[in-house]
Image (tube, rainbow, N blue to C red):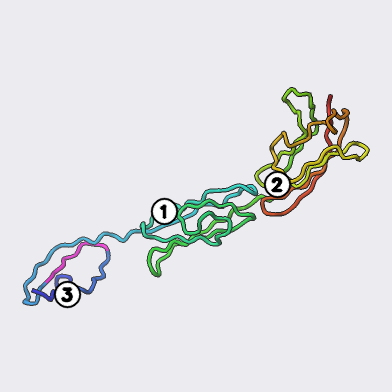
Amino acid sequence: MPPYRIGLSGDALQPADVPLALPAGVFLLRIEDATGCGETQEVTVPPAPSWVMELGRDTSIRLGQAVRLQPQGLWPQSAQFSWQPPQGLDCDTCAVVMAMPPRSTRYELTLRIAPGCELRDALTILVDGRAPVYVPNAFSPNGDGINDWLAVFAGDGVATVRSFRVFDRWGAAVFERLNFSPNVESLGWDGAVRGRPANAGLYVYTIEWERADGQTERASGEAMLLR
């Protein structure tokens, strides 16, 4: 018959709707009703779970490259995730994210288990801001499918090639292309000037490109046209 009281055997009982704060272990628990009738039972309280979370070591990427961030550890399914800063992440409240920061960034993950109970860890993604651009130093536009174009090649850190210009040894422009993607041979120079094969010899080129972080870089070089 209610109300019921509960407590450890031999101790004072308390209302059953008041939680008992017990550590891990084995206890004799007694429950009684309003008439004083009750029973004693052995109860085992398991250890509280040890929630842990870690992000691992710092990592390095090239500018324009993405890396997967996935915490390891143990936490309840109801835990909430919060990444800071959100810049460069495809999701700032997901457990697993893809990060492509424009510059070296320290990301911190906060895992909220309950009010006042949080786990935190952080790692730094070091970004190599160099955006290498490569142009062959020789090409042979003879239609054999090998080195037929003087083309611009680049890594992930290059967003677009703003300009690619080629000049003969007297400084006359023989080729120009603006605002195009690198790594496409057919967008380079085919060794022709106004539809006619250019003379064999040394040519000078200039390049201007935009990096994935919005910065602009320039370079120049020489290439030999072989016949």
- SS under mark 1: strand
> Looking at the picture, does residue 137 appear above or below residue 38?
above
Residue linked to disc 1? 73
Circle 3 Cα neighbour tier, 10 Å, few/some/many (<14 / 14–19 / ≥20): few
Mark positioned earlier in the residue sequence (3 or 1): 3
Residue numbers of the magenta segment: 24-31
Which amino acid lies under the numbered mark 1 shown in the image of this protein?
Answer: Gly
Q: On residue 160, which mark appears?
A: 2
Q: Nearer the viewer, mark 2 or mark 1?
A: 2
Tell me if residue 28 is in the magenta stretch.
Answer: yes
Image coordinates of residue 198 in percent, x first then y, are 86, 30
Q: Which residue is pictured at 42% across the width and 65% down the height? A: 118
Circle 1 Cα neighbour tier, 10 Å, few/some/many (<14 / 14–19 / ≥20): few
Cα–Cα span, label 2 and label 1: 41 Å
Which amino acid lies under the numbered mark 3 shown in the image of this protein?
Answer: Asp
User: Which quarter of the image is occupied by the N terminus?
Assistant: bottom left
Which amino acid lies under the numbered mark 2 shown in the image of this protein?
Answer: Thr
- SS under mark 3: loop
Circle 2 Cα neighbour tier, 10 Å, few/some/many (<14 / 14–19 / ≥20): some
